[in-house]
Amino acid sequence: MPTLTALAGAATAAYGVGLVAAPRLLITPIALEDSPDTRTLVRVLGARDVALGLAMVAAPAGRARRLATAARVAGDWSDAALFGVGLAGRRTRGPVAAAAMLWGALCLAAGVLDERAGR
């Protein structure tokens, strides 16, 4: 059975693939202008999520998995902070920042639970 960290990583990578293929998955909920530049930026975020998610899937237990998970959490929580600042005044600010915080917390919890279970 896959570890919780690998499952969280696979979900992250799948979402990243979705963003690369269809940037509107993020553009629409954030209510940003749908332009070529915005789609490019969203695709960059998607590519980052694919890389970090696959790292979480592939990393062996121990330091490598902790580092992959920490990188993912740092990415999500920095997204939350930057969305919180950058979307000030928009009705989408709270939900979008909260979603990024929750993804980071989910990945962190998966890593901690796997560590505690010796997986």
Image (cartoon, helix red, strand yellow):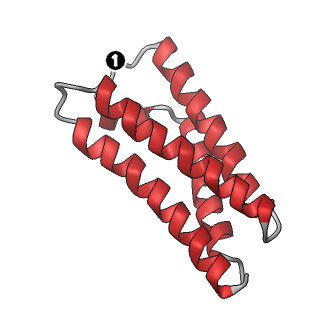
Q: Which image quarter holds the N terminus?
A: bottom right
**For this view, does 92 lie left or right of residue 7?**
left
**For this view, does 15 lie left or right of residue 64?**
left
Dividing the picture into quadrants, the one containing residue 57 is bottom right
Q: Position of residue 83 (x, y in %)?
A: 36, 32
Tell me if I can see residue 25 in this picture: no
Q: Amino acid at mark 1?
A: Glu
Residue, x 68% and y 48% (percent of image)?
A: 52
Tell me if I can see residue 75 in this picture: yes
* 90 relative to 119, above or below: above
Q: Which image quarter holds the C terminus?
A: bottom right
Residue, x 31% and y 49% (percent of image)?
A: 98
Dividing the picture into quadrants, the one containing residue 118 is bottom right
For mark 1, give the secondary structure. loop
Could you say which is closer to the camera, residue 79 or residue 51?
Answer: 79
- Looking at the rendered structure, the number of numbered marks drawn on it comes to 1
Q: Local crowd at mark 1 within 10 Å, few (<14), some, or many (≥20)?
A: few
Q: Which residue is mark 1?
A: 33
Q: Position of residue 82 (x, y in %)?
A: 39, 30
Residue, x 64% and y 57% (percent of image)?
A: 69
* 66 relative to 52, above or below: below
Could you say which is closer to the camera, residue 39 or residue 63?
Answer: 63
Residue, x 64% and y 60% (percent of image)?
A: 9
Q: Position of residue 85 (x, y in %)?
A: 31, 27
* 73 relative to 33, above or below: below
Q: Position of residue 34 (x, y in %)?
A: 39, 19
